[in-house]
Image (cartoon, rainbow, N blue to C red):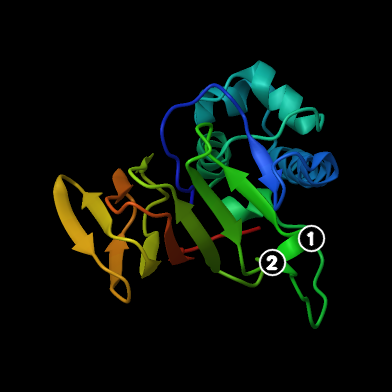
């Protein structure tokens, strides 16, 4: 879902947990993203102006995110991660390494598109030793999500649990039914479409050629 999935160009920012109006969940994720952004920018020795030029995200928006006052949309988060050359989840994951970590569905943080028709939930905490991410994706009926190119060498392995999915990669469309899987190079623009009349559920594993979190 690196330097994931945008996705369509958007100006609004929407984030939610299991309940769309969960303010505490939004606040918690905003704090995590702010801390990671500040850490990555400091490590890269980049000013907000320099990061804005590299990512295509305005300096004002970056400042709001780093201050914890705004949570980025999927599209914006992917642009920032790509600018740093790190996996998407590097912005979303708390930097802790417990031996066992249970992630209750009721407490999960879900990142949504501005339209609310597409959502992604991290199922696999990523730390400095890992080069893979595991996501749950949901697309509303008729929803299409356009993803910008991820970092060079990024692979997406997608499995359809429910729904009828069309994936367009470099102009070629691939149709997937429940149980079907696909593996492809995600370093070029691609899109996901739900052509069924019910919500589609997919599971995505993303792997990266190299990363330093």
In the image, is residue 68 above or below residue 211? above
Please determine whether, in this image, residue 72 is positioned above or below residue 106: above
Residue highlighted by disc 2: 127
Toward which corner of the image does residue 112 lie, by quadrant? top right
Task: Find residue 44 and report its horizontal and vertical position in percent.
Answer: 66, 41
Dots 1, 2 in contact, CB < 8 A: yes
What residue is pinned by disc 1?
95
Residue extending furthest toward the right: 24
**Spot occupied by residue 50 in the image (x, y as percentages of width and height):** 60, 24
Residue 1 is at least partly visible in this image: no
Marked residue nearer the N-terminal end (1 or 2): 1
Q: Secondary structure at mark 1?
A: loop
Residue count near mark 1 (Cα–Cα under 10 Å), binned few <14, some 14–19, many ≥20: some
Mark count: 2
Q: Quadrant of the C terminus?
A: bottom right
Residue 72: quarter of image: top right
For this orientation, the residue located farthest to the front is 197
Q: CA distance from mark 1 to mark 2?
A: 7 Å
Disc marking residue 128: none
Q: Residue at x 56, y 44 (%)?
A: 81
Task: Return the x and y of residue 211 as percentages of the image width and height.
Answer: 55, 60
């Amino acid at each position: 879902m690196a330097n994931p999935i945008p996705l369509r160009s958007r100006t609004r920012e929407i984030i939610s947990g299991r309940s769309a109006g969960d303010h505490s969940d939004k606040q918690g994720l905003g704090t995590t993203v702010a801390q990671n952004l500040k850490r990555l920018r400091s490590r890269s020795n980049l000013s907000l102006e320099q990061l804005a030029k590299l990512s295509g995200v305005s300096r004002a928006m970056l400042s709001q995110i780093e201050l914890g006052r705004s949570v980025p949309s999927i599209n914006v988060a992917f642009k920032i991660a790509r600018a740093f050359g790190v996996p998407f989840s590097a912005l979303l994951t708390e930097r802790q390494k417990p031996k066992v970590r249970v992630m209750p569905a009721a407490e999960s943080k879900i990142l949504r598109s501005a339209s609310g028709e597409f959502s992604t939930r991290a199922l696999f905490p990523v730390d400095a030793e890992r080069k893979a991410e595991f996501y749950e994706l949901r697309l509303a009926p008729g929803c299409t999500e356009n993803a910008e190119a991820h970092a060079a060498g990024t692979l997406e392995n997608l499995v359809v649990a429910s729904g009828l999915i069309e994936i367009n990669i470099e102009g070629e469309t691939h149709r997937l039914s429940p149980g079907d899987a696909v593996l492809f190079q995600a370093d070029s623009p691609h899109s996901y479409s739900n052509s069924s009349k019910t919500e589609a559920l997919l599971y995505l594993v993303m792997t990266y050629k190299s990363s330093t979190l």
